[in-house]
């Protein structure tokens, strides 16, 4: 039980000072009682996780604690984001005796059962049921996308090319997991965050947890030691793609903290930076403004993930451009630069320019060749099955299985088009672009009336734009998937706030140090 005591001590030594220093900042956005409860629960669950010999021991102790915290918390969505990566997302199979397999469970689904599903159930039976439960445009896009996924059976990627056949039980399992993993998350966030205070509280809670992960990630890279890998190995020794995640970039270890993968951690930190761009505007203590951003950037660099690096830069540039209301001018300049860049690429100077770019210095390496072959094969298969995809595509790409034992599609859009066709991809993009457009329109309306509310919307729009860029270079897995639907839910919630004129600039009183009990 105490084999991971050394790692636990290091994690607590990092998290303790972070929570102590972050408290005065967090209390500007969250209630003191909520912050203290979330912090204490995070510390307790971390201790329980490291001392538990299996996930089931952890779940047995954690479940009643999470249920209790949800009932006490004034904003359970903020609690959900605070605990989203308190332990790594290690999947274990639920043991059953009647059927061969039920489904896997991890910390994501545990939080869904303990926090999200009770929220959705409560909203359905609230007094404002018609306002909270009625289907909206984004709901229709998402439900249609889920229906395509349920109807089209993609066999699991099993060794020795074993192909399982579909059944009614499998279809019901896919429907249940889509509701638990996706729709309940979007529904709870979009309906529960019904005012500006709730959205700001959720963003602040996520930032606090990400600051801890950023420092853990920096420690991992600097000491070449993954603090959560031993815990993952003790919970699931058969998930080799997860527990053997010592990924290197040159001689440097790519940090992953409790996110499950370096790219997932980098994406989470990039979104936290996007949230902080808004939150820092309400923070008056200048050292806090700089230190939070510096820590998040430090953790982001420790992941050595190019896509999220560029995504974070895009989030910052989009935020600056939209905040200064120079979107149309930026779009014009961006279009001109795109045409100039395309002209250069088509000219004899194209190869020289590409070789000079630092982000493409790996173009002649194995990674570039693999991605090139993968793109060519994906294009061929999508052309052959354009509308609803080819559910046996993974079997036809067996020669592209890499050293980790997987076929890494690396592009979310290509993966959806490959397995669910252009119909599935259209529904997926229709869902997120509807949220993006509605949030952008609401922010444009709010800026001249309530600049603070408008800035909140701009940060959400910037984060969604960065996400759409990042997922073009990675699959929609782990925390990337969760934050994608959280952002969509926050965009829907923001777009459905009361009229800006009815929303005060500071919807939650700022708690000064004199009002904080020590």
Image: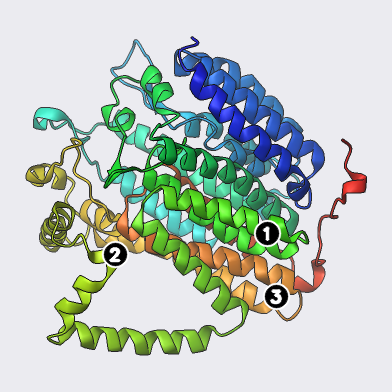
In the foreground, 221 or 105: 221
Q: Earlier in the sequence, mark 1 or mark 3?
A: 1
Left/right of residue 507 with respect to residue 112 in the rendered view:
right
* Residue, disc 3: 446
The local crowd at label 2, few if under 14, some if 14 to 19, many if 20 or more residues have their Cα within 10 Å, is: few
Give the number of callouts: 3
Q: In the picture, which quadrant includes the C terminus?
A: top right
Q: Give the structural element (helix, strand or loop) at label 2.
A: helix
Residue 265 coordinates in the image, percent (x, y): 44, 45
For residue 289, the mark is 1
Q: CA distance from mark 3 to mark 2?
A: 38 Å
Residue 261, given in percent of the width and then of the height, sits at 37, 40
Question: Is 178 positioned to the left or the right of 81 in the image?
Answer: left
Q: Secondary structure at mark 1?
A: helix
> In this orientation, which residue lies closer to the viewer: 226 or 73?
226
Residue where numbered disc 2 is placed: 359
Viewer-side residue, 309 vs 195: 309
Disc with the residue nearer the chain's start (1 vs 2): 1
On the rendered structure, is 378 left or right of 211?
Answer: left
Residue at the right extreme, as displayed: 514
Query: Which SS class for mark 3?
Result: helix
For image coordinates 38% across by 35% down, the residue present is 224
Q: Is residue 368 above or below residue 259?
A: below
């Amino acid at each position: 039980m105490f084999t991971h005591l050394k790692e636990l001590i290091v994690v607590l030594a990092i998290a303790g000072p972070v929570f102590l220093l972050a408290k005065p900042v967090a209390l500007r956005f969250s209630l003191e009682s909520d912050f203290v409860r979330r912090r204490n629960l995070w510390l307790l669950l971390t201790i329980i996780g490291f001392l538990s010999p299996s996930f089931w021991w952890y779940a047995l102790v954690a479940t009643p604690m999470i249920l209790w915290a949800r009932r006490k918390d004034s904003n359970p969505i903020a609690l959900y984001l605070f605990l989203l990566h308190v332990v790594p997302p290690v999947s274990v199979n639920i043991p059953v005796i009647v059927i061969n397999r039920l489904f896997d469970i991890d910390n994501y689904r545990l939080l869904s059962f303990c926090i999200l599903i009770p929220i959705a159930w409560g909203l359905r039976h609230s007094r404002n049921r018609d306002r909270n439960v009625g289907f909206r445009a984004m709901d229709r896009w998402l439900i249609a996308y889920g229906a395509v996924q349920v109807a089209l059976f993609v066999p699991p990627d099993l060794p020795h090319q074993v192909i399982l056949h579909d059944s009614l039980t499998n279809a019901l399992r896919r429907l249940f997991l889509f509701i638990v993993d996706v729709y309940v998350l979007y529904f709870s966030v979009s309906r529960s965050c019904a005012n500006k205070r709730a959205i700001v509280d959720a963003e602040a809670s996520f930032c606090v947890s990400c600051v801890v992960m950023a420092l853990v990630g920096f420690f991992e890279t600097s000491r070449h030691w993954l603090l959560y890998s031993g815990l993952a190995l003790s919970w699931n020794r058969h998930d080799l793609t997860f527990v053997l995640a010592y990924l290197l970039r040159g001689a440097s270890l790519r940090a992953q903290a409790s996110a499950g993968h370096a790219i997932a951690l980098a994406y989470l930190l990039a979104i936290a930076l996007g949230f902080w761009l808004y939150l820092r505007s309400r923070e008056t203590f200048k050292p806090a403004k700089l230190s939070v951003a510096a820590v998040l950037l430090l953790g982001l660099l420790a992941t050595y993930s190019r896509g999220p690096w560029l995504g974070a830069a895009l989030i910052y540039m989009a935020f600056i451009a939209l905040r200064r209301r120079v979107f149309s001018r930026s779009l014009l300049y961006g279009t001109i630069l795109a045409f100039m860049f395309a002209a250069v690429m088509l000219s004899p100077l194209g190869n020289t320019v590409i070789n000079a770019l630092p982000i493409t210095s790996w173009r002649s390496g194995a990674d570039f060749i693999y991605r090139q072959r993968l793109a060519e094969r994906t294009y061929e298969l999508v052309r052959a099955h354009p509308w609803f995809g080819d559910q046996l595509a993974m079997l036809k790409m067996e020669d592209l299985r890499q050293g980790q034992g997987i076929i890494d599609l690396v592009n979310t859009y290509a993966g959806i088009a490959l397995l669910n066709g252009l119909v599935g991809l259209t529904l997926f993009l229709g869902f997120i672009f509807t949220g993006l457009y509605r949030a952008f329109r609401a922010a444009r309306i709010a800026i001249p009336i309530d600049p603070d509310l408008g800035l909140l919307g701009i940060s959400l729009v910037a984060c969604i734009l960065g996400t759409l860029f990042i997922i073009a270079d990675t699959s929609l897995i782990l925390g990337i998937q969760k934050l994608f639907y959280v952002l969509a839910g926050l965009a829907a919630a923001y777009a459905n706030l009361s009229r800006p004129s009815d929303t005060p600039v500071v919807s939650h009183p700022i708690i000064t140090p004199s009002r904080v009990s020590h």
